[in-house]
Amino acid sequence: MLVKKRFLSHDEVQGQVNNIIRHLQKNGIKPAAIVGITRGGLTPAVMMSHYFNCPLLVLDYSLRDRDEASLNDAATNHVIDRMGELIETGQIVVVDDINDSGETLKGLKGLFHDEFFSDNNIIYATLLEKSTSKFDCDFYGEMLMDTQCDDWIVFPWEDWWLNKS
């Protein structure tokens, strides 16, 4: 079976970021900080951090690229400590590119809640949310329905040198 690829353009990503920002504002959320998840969450997180004029924290967390034992490193602990400081002034928005299976975001939620954060002060947002995911984001730029969930999404910062979008 051939995998259907969907190449997103920079304009599509900008529109998805705008959708998330609009939903955050509609719900009265002015983030105290944006946390970008490596690698795919960094571009939208930078955009949102600039828009809201708030700190950007980078969290190197990937179930695909790392093993669970390596998640408790000094850099991760530094980000969590900084989140703990900033949470006093508002909510933290955690940003990733896609909520595929939901495993990454479930893992993060577990990591954060093992620390001292509650459900109402951490907001999860992704550019794309698959309807088949086991984790429901608070906000997303676009919902991928069942018929689109098998598509392989290629973001403009992936394989950009091939100039497909």
Image (cartoon, rainbow, N blue to C red):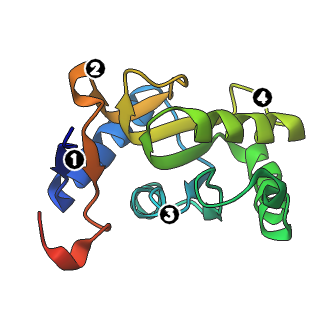
Gap between marks 4 and 2 measured at Cα = 31 Å
Residue displayed at 80% across by 61% down = 70
- Left or right of 162, for residue 129: right
Gap between marks 1 and 4 measured at Cα = 30 Å
Nearer to us of marks 4 and 2 is 2
> Which amino acid, by three-letter code, is at mark 3?
Arg
Nearer to us in this view, 9 or 163: 163
Disc 4 on helix, strand or loop? loop
> Which amino acid, by three-letter code, is at mark 2?
Asp
> Which amino acid, by three-letter code, is at mark 4?
Ser
Nearer to us of marks 1 and 3 is 3
Nearer to us of marks 3 and 4 is 3
Residue denoted by label 3: 39
Gap between marks 3 and 4 measured at Cα = 25 Å
Residue farthest bottom in this picture = 161
- Left or right of 117, for residue 135: left
Residue 27: where, in percent of width, then height?
46, 26
- Number of the label disc, if any, that sits on residue 146: 2
Disc 2 on helix, strand or loop? helix
Vertical placement of 136 versus 99: above or below? above
Residue denoted by label 4: 118
Work out whether mark 3 precedes mark 4 in sequence or the reverse, and give the earlier one.
3
Residue denoted by label 1: 15
Work out whether mark 1 precedes mark 3 in sequence or the reverse, and give the earlier one.
1
Residues under numbered marks 2 and 1 in contact, where contact means CB atoms less than 8 Å apart: no
Work out whether mark 4 precedes mark 2 in sequence or the reverse, and give the earlier one.
4
- Place residue 66 in its image quadrant: bottom right
- Left or right of 24, for residue 154: left
Gap between marks 3 and 2 measured at Cα = 25 Å
